[in-house]
């Protein structure tokens, strides 16, 4: 794989690197993105109509069942070469901040630390009433049938309804993570956006903030997303192919 020398030079000189990842980075681990057709019975459902507060109000067991299905799918999946390349990169650059829209934990399982989760995490849930946070158990081997309704649990301290610990369409982002992401986007030398359709706001605005602040901006995506004209370099291909090659060729003396 051949990269533009100006890209490699710019990256080599970067002291602060920010990376924003979306569902596409986990696609090669077998986790469907929202743009892929969902499998099995979930094909009949549109994610943008399941991932909303009103969907949970209308049919909490359907929404909880969908999140359990997604959570189990992630538990059965493994991080891929792109997740691992980012974890390696954090050892090679002076400062790397990883921001993700993903609700899976594949970055952490690849070895990344301090990941800023802008859209929450599948492994967490919290009480709608008292906001008590729960970490959901890891050891569930079976994938529930697609379309299966599962009643959400009750809060152990107040009896309220427990909901998935993710950010739904129409909800605000976790403030601390968001502010940290804005700060790092505005202060980095290089910003790499990987596997996101760049349409979900406000996360998608981060790359524009980085560009406006003068950072080198790089997109990694097999498809056209519409931000091609706003980034310094657009690398067309899968994250699992491009990121390991980019890390290897930029910091050639080290192995990935
Ligand atoms: P999206 O589903 O809107 O878009 C996915 C993007 O990934 C597309 O642009 C696609 O071209 C690209 N892509 C597909 N395969 C790729 C590959 N191998 N390498 C690189 N890119 C690839 O996802 P989004 O932009 O992240 O936003 C939608 C929302 O979906 C987010 O809020 C996120 O929380 C949620 N989501 C998360 C997961 C997850 O945690 N794994 C999965 C599905 C959806
Ligand atoms: Zn409670």
Image: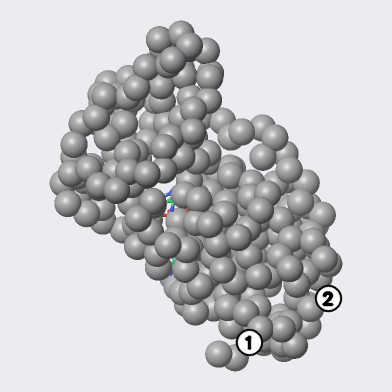
Q: Secondary structure under badge 2?
A: loop
Location of the N terminus by quadrant is bottom right
Which of the 4 quarters of the picture holds residue 156? top left
Residue 59 placement, left or right of 25:
left
Which of the 4 quarters of the picture holds residue 118? top right
Indicate the position of residue 158 as horizontal and vertical percent values: 46, 8
Location of the C terminus by quadrant is bottom right
Q: Residue at x 43, y 35 (%)?
A: 136
Q: Residue at x 66, y 53 (%)?
A: 113
Cα distance, mark 2 to mark 1? 16 Å
Point out which mark residue 147 bears.
Answer: none
Q: Residue at x 74, y 60 (%)?
A: 96
Mark 2 or 1, nearer chain start = 1
Indicate the position of residue 128 as horizontal and vertical percent values: 46, 17
Q: Residue furthest bottom?
A: 2
Q: Residue at x 20, y 49 (%)?
A: 43
Identify residue for label 1: 3
Tell me if I can see residue 206 in this picture.
no
Residue 17 placement, left or right of 45:
right
Residue toward you, 121 or 236 = 121
How was the colour assigned to the protein in this rendering? one colour
Residue toward you, 61 or 232 = 61
Tell me if I can see residue 3 in this picture.
yes
Residue 35 placement, left or right of 168:
left
Q: Is 130 placed above or below 253 here?
A: above
User: Local crowd at mark 1 within 10 Å, few (<14), some, or many (≥20)?
Assistant: some
Identify residue for label 2: 13
Q: Secondary structure under badge 1?
A: loop
Tag 2 near tag 1, CB within 8 Å: no
Indicate the position of residue 180 as horizontal and vertical percent values: 73, 43
């Amino acid at each position: 794989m051949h990269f533009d020398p100006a890209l490699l030079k710019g990256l080599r000189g970067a002291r602060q690197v920010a990376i924003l990842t979306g569902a596409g980075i986990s696609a090669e681990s077998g986790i469907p993105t929202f743009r892929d057709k969902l499998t099995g019975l979930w094909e009949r459902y549109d994610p943008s109509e399941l991932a909303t507060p009103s969907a949970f109000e209308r049919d909490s067991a359907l929404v909880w069942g969908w999140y359990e299905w997604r959570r189990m799918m992630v538990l059965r999946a493994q991080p891929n070469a792109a997740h691992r390349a980012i974890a390696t990169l954090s050892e090679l650059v002076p400062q790397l901040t990883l921001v993700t829209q993903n609700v899976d934990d594949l970055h952490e399982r690849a070895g990344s630390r301090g990941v800023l989760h802008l859209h929450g995490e599948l492994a967490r849930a919290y009480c709608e009433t008292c906001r008590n946070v729960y970490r959901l158990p890891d050891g569930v081997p079976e994938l529930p049938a697609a379309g299966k309704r599962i009643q959400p649990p009750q809060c152990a301290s107040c009896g309220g309804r427990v909901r998935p610990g993710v950010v739904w369409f129409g909800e605000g982002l976790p403030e601390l993570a968001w502010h940290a992401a804005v700060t790092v986007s505005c202060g980095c030398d290089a910003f790499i956006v990987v596997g996101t359709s760049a349409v979900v706001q406000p996360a998608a605005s981060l790359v524009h903030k980085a560009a406006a602040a003068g950072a080198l901006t790089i997109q990694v995506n097999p498809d056209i997303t519409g931000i091609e004209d706003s980034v310094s370099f657009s690398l067309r291909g899968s994250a699992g192919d491009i990121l390991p090659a980019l890390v290897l060729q930029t910091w050639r003396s080290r192995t990935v």
